[in-house]
């Protein structure tokens, strides 16, 4: 499941009455594997073991094989032997009823339907009404006792999550069908019905099996030869690829699950191109630190594409066994496969005592962050430690990650003493300054966007920051980016275009309705939401209709949570679809009642059509559920000011400022309103 900070806004959803083509076909749910119809002479044995016993044996013990399991004595790792667990005064009781595993929590009994994962933790799924499966927040720490494992724990710590919190386990953000399922089972279809707020989810195999990566006909992974090799050349301490450019198509197959992204279709397969199946999350805050280091649960791909190793042609299976998923060698031996040990694995390079933590390559080049309470995951950008950038990129550094009692300045001085004062420029400085909208950030951003040695994924993400500088130079940069041969640059340029006047935006974006990738086509539709579709030139009418259909299908994929209909409300609101916009915001509130943005935007929608009474009624509806919410209190305060009810407004503005002191705007407006009210007395 997701970390506490993982709340991503995505433009999704559509009401069933509005778009009839959302009625997708499905197969009946099954809790066990089914036999797949393999073509081209393959055996119909679904587990492939009859011909590939070694690979099958490696896979059987892997995380993929254990990604989803039926509950039984062999699969359940947690202690259900009449175990009582207390979190922040709230008691949960784990027990068995015959062959079944049960939990009593929050005064209700729930049967465990599935076990979810194995290491370093195992989670458990509870069946709810309407085909929904929710993830129990109490998880089993499957690590050894010596490192604190073999215990029940709450993935959000020791604080009880209230039922009116979006992170409560029965809320949409903890829903397995939408959040987790497509990467833990093979051939999964969510099959969500927005009208009834229900799922009819199905899968081909309960876990991640052979077909997930190889495709039905074994026509993806392992069939494109990497017949050349990594070799050491004279005067080089690191191996380079010999021969033609190495095939890296494997990465897209892994990226389907090992990336932070939004789905564009209901289900995906190994043969799908990544940008046809997904819209990737940009390398920007809050998901990443400004220099590209991982912050939220980012799942490797976005990091790896920043790395020099990716640029040189490295693929996932160069380091990871594709079936057991284990690292191919232990410790530094993995790295010295391609980086000569005589040069790198000694104190003259790493400057730490042999066999110490500091002598491990991953400590400096792959620092880890902990997610879900116990899950340490390493950054795969393989960057050189740069504590000298800490104060200018607002990002952590690997040195003080270990030396917690020291400051980044100390670490920077140590590195300067060891290696000299010269440092290469780093895009983290420009990305941080541009994210803050500083004047210096504009020209620094311009430099990295023109520098093709900067990773494509960074230049693509950097384009989005041009919206902080809505001027003619940014317009020219975006126009150039839209014509790039690099898909992620085109995608970033499309996302950056919102400040451009609609007529100019149409001219530069409409040609990309014919882009080869679905992710770009659908983002063009989103970026042209305020376009008058009736005035689109004939040459683009059919491409626009096709892309809009793709866009609407994409939005359905997250219509099970508030962000879905909310963001689609933004889309149709830009097209002045008043009734549909209102219905979408109301749908968002219905399925996700603790998603505050829907109340605020619906209130703004009513204000825009001159219905201030409904504005206040909508905000009161949200405050009845979340009386301490700063955003709702602030919005109500503004509404009351517009109605010349200053004394009442001051109460809500003050509450907003107190609840969210980090929001300087709230404090400023409160102080101005207070001063004005005093003067009017």
Image (spheres, rainbow, N blue to C red):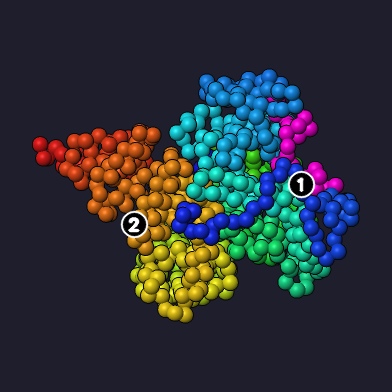
Residue segment shown in magenta: 57-80
Q: Looking at the image, is 675 positioned above or below residue 483?
A: above
Nearer the observer, 20 or 8: 20
Among all residues in the image, which is located at the extreme left? 681
**In this view of the protein, which residue sits in the foreground, 562 or 336?**
562
Residue pictured at 53% horizontal, 67% vertical: 520
Q: Which SS does the magenta portion mostly show?
A: loop
Question: Is there any visible trace of residue 556 in the rendered image?
Answer: yes
Decide if residue 547 is on the left or right side of residue 305: left
Could you say which quadrant of the image residue 506 lies in?
A: bottom left
Work out whether mark 2 precedes mark 1 in sequence or the reverse, and give the earlier one: 1
Disc 1 residue crowd, few under 14, some 14–19, many 20+, Cα 10 Å: some
Which residue is the site of mark 2?
A: 578
Residue topped by disc 1: 33
Magenta region includes residue 378: no
* Quarter of the figure that contains the N terminus: top right
Q: CA distance from mark 2 to mark 1?
A: 47 Å
- Classify 10 Å Cα crowding around label 2: few (below 14), some (14-19), many (20 and above): some
Is residue 67 within the magenta segment?
A: yes
Numbered disc 1: secondary structure: loop
């Amino acid at each position: 499941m997701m970390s506490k900070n993982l709340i991503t806004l995505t433009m999704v959803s559509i009401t069933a009455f509005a778009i009839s083509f959302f009625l997708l076909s499905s197969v009946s749910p099954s809790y066990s594997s089914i036999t797949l119809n393999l073509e081209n002479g393959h055996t119909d044995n679904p587990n492939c073991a009859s011909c590939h016993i070694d690979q099958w044996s490696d896979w059987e013990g892997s995380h993929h094989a254990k990604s989803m399991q039926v509950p039984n004595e062999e699969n359940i790792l947690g202690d259900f032997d009449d175990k009582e667990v207390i979190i922040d005064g709230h008691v949960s009781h784990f027990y068995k009823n015959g062959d079944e595993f049960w939990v009593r929590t929050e005064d209700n009994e729930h049967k465990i339907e599935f076990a979810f994962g194995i290491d370093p933790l195992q989670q458990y799924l509870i069946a709810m009404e309407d085909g929904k499966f929710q993830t129990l927040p109490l998880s089993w720490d499957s690590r050894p006792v010596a490192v604190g494992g073999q215990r029940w724990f709450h993935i959000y710590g020791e604080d009880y999550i209230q039922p009116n919190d979006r992170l409560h386990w029965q809320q949409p953000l903890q829903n397995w069908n939408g959040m987790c399922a497509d990467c833990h089972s093979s051939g999964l279809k969510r099959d969500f019905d927005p009208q009834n707020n229900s799922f009819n989810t199905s899968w081909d195999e309960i876990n991640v099996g052979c077909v997930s990566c190889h495709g039905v006909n074994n026509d993806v992974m392992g069939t494109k030869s990497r017949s050349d090799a990594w070799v050491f050349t004279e005067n080089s301490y690191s191996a380079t690829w010999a021969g033609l450019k190495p095939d890296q198509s494997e990465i897209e197959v892994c990226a389907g699950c090992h990336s932070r992204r939004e789905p564009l279709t209901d289900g995906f397969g190994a043969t799908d191109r990544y940008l046809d199946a997904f819209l990737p999350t940009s390398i920007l805050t809050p998901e990443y630190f400004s220099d590209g280091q991982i912050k939220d649960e980012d799942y490797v791909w976005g990091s790896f594409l920043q790395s020099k190793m990716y640029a040189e042609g490295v693929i996932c299976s160069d380091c990871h066994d594709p079936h057991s998923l284990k690292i191919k060698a232990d410790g530094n031996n993995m790295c010295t496969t391609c980086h000569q040990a005589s040069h790198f694995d000694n104190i003259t390079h790493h400057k730490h005592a042999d066999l110490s933590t500091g002598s491990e390559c991953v400590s400096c080049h792959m620092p880890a962050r902990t997610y879900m309470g116990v899950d340490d995951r390493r950054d795969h950008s393989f960057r050189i430690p740069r504590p000298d950038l800490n104060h200018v990129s607002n990002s952590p550094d690997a040195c003080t990650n270990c030396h917690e009692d020291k400051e980044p300045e100390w670490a920077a001085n140590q590195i300067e003493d060891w290696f000299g004062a010269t440092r290469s420029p780093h895009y983290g400085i420009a990305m941080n300054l541009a994210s803050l909208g500083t004047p210096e950030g504009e020209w620094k951003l311009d430099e990295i966007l023109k520098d093709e040695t900067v990773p494509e994924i960074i230049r693509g993400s950097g384009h989005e920051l041009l919206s902080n500088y809505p001027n003619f130079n940014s317009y020219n940069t975006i126009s150039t980016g839209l014509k790039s041969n690099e898909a992620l640059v085109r995608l970033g340029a499309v996302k950056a275009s919102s400040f451009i006047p609609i007529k100019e935006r149409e001219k530069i974006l409409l040609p990309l309705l014919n882009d080869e990738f679905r992710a770009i086509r659908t983002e063009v539709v989103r970026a042209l939401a305020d376009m008058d579709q009736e005035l689109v030139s004939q040459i683009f009418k059919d491409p626009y209709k096709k892309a809009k259909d793709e866009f609407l299908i994409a939005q359905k994929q997250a219509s099970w949570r508030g962000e879905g209909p909310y963001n689609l409300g933004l889309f149709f609101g830009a097209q002045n679809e008043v009734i549909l916009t209102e219905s979408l915001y109301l749908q968002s509130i219905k399925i996700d009642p603790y998603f505050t943005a829907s109340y605020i935007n619906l209130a703004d929608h009513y204000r825009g059509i001159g219905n201030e009474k409904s504005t206040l009624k909508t905000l009161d509806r949200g405050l009845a559920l979340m009386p301490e919410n700063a955003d709702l209190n602030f919005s109500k305060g503004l509404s009351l000011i517009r109605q010349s009810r200053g004394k009442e407004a001051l109460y809500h503005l003050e509450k907003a400022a107190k609840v969210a002191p980090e929001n300087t705007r709230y404090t400023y407006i409160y102080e101005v309103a207070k001063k004005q009210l005093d003067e009017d007395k």
